[in-house]
């Protein structure tokens, strides 16, 4: 009952020819093919981008800081600011003299 029979296809082709005309059908099929090709290429590039991002995230998760070497002073971690000396205001220095 749900199978597509040859006469169904023939009726569909006749209706399409009557609606769109014989000259416009090849152009419509050509533009449909181009659109499908573009969609396929874009979905493939999106999947490749997702795969690349996942690989980069996995690679960065394995990074560990190097241990400090013997004989070299340790540096403060990046999240801590190094101690700073108090800054003298140049205007006060001029007034003091």
Image: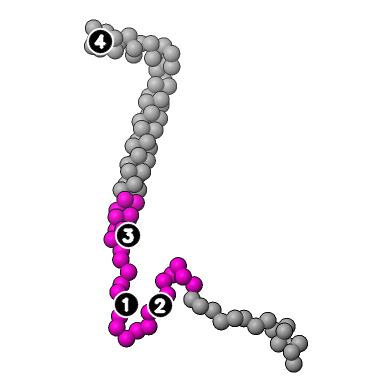
Q: Secondary structure at mark 3?
A: helix
**Magenta-drawn stretch contains 45:** no
N-term mark: 3 or 2 = 3
**Magenta-drawn stretch contains 55:** yes
Q: Secondary structure at mark 2?
A: loop
Q: Which residue is mark 4?
A: 2
The answer for how far apart the CA atoms under marks 1 and 2 are is 9 Å
Q: Is residue 2 visible?
A: yes
**Placement of 96 over or under 4, stated as above or below:** below
Q: Quadrant of the N terminus?
A: top left
Residue sitting at x 34%, y 37% = 40
The magenta span reads 52-81
Residue 62 point in image, percent of width and height? 28, 61
Q: Which residue is mark 1?
A: 68
Nearer the observer: mark 3 or 2; the answer is 2
Q: Quadrant of the C terminus?
A: bottom right
Task: Name the foreground residue: 48 vs 64.
Answer: 64
Q: Secondary structure at mark 4?
A: loop
Q: Which residue is mark 2?
A: 75
Mark seen at residue 60: 3
Residue 43 point in image, percent of width and height? 35, 39
The answer for how far apart the CA atoms under marks 2 and 4 are is 75 Å
N-term mark: 1 or 3 = 3
The answer for how far apart the CA atoms under marks 3 and 4 are is 53 Å
Mark seen at residue 86: none
Counting other residues with Cα less than 10 Å from the Cα at mark 3, is it few (<14), some (14-19), or many (20 or more)?
few
């Amino acid at each position: 009952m749900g199978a597509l029979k040859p006469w169904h296809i023939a009726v569909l082709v006749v209706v399409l020819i009557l609606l769109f005309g014989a000259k416009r059908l090849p152009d419509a099929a050509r533009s449909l093919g181009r659109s499908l090709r573009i969609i396929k290429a874009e979905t493939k590039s999106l999947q490749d981008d997702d795969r690349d991002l996942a690989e980069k995230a996995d690679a960065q998760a394995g990074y560990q800081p190097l241990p400090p070497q013997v004989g070299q002073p340790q540096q403060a971690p990046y999240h801590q600011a190094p101690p700073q000396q108090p800054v003298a205001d140049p205007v006060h220095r001029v007034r003091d003299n």
